Amino acid sequence: MNFLRRLFGGNDNNREHDGAIHVYVECGRCHAVVHVRVDPRNDLMPEYGDGDDLTGYRLIKEIMDSRCFRLMRAEIEYDVRRREINRTIEGGAFITRDEYEQRRSSLSSPPRD
Ligand SMILES: [Zn+2]
């Protein structure tokens, strides 16, 4: 895993935030919103083409909300420079950070059942 350390370690281009990837999702069943913080050093899997060439990275994250506890499965693809090129999710939907913050603040009095 030394090459990962070299790839992600010595370069200051990604100092904004803490280098982590923040993912915001909404559960497709109960519409609860969830924020997950992903550490690229642990969670990004390098992908290789036919040869030994690195073609990009893939992040697969299983996310569970705290209301209905259904598992969502997010998958995000990155190019070799770790720029996002595609994202899909099963069981929910991606939302923006702003949407997440709004939804969180409107949940101050959760409904009872
Ligand atoms: Zn749910």
Image (spheres, rainbow, N blue to C red):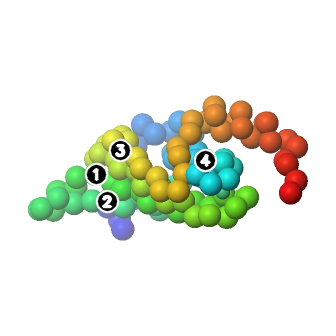
Amino acid type at image mark 1? Gly
Number of the label disc, if any, that sits on residue 56: 1
Amino acid at dot 3: Asn
Q: Which mark is residue 26?
A: 4
Q: CA distance from mark 2 to mark 4?
A: 27 Å
Q: Secondary structure at mark 4?
A: strand
Marks 1 and 4, the one that precedes in the sequence: 4
Q: Nearer the viewer, mark 2 or mark 4?
A: 4
Residue 86 badge: 3
Which residue is label 2 attached to? 46
Q: Is residue 4 visible?
A: no
Q: Earlier in the sequence, mark 2 or mark 3?
A: 2
Query: Is the residue indicated by label 2 positioned so its CB lies within 8 Å of ligand 1?
Result: no
- Mark 1 / mark 2, whichever is N-terminal: 2
Q: Identify the secondary structure beneath mark 1.
A: strand
Q: CA distance from mark 1 to mark 2?
A: 6 Å
Q: Secondary structure at mark 3?
A: strand
Can you tell which of label 1 and label 3 is closer to the viewer?
3
Report the side of 33 relative to 20 (left or right). Answer: right
Q: Is residue 64 above or below residue 17?
A: below
Asked if the residue under mark 4 is in contact with the one under mark 2, i.e. CB atoms within 8 Å, the reply is no
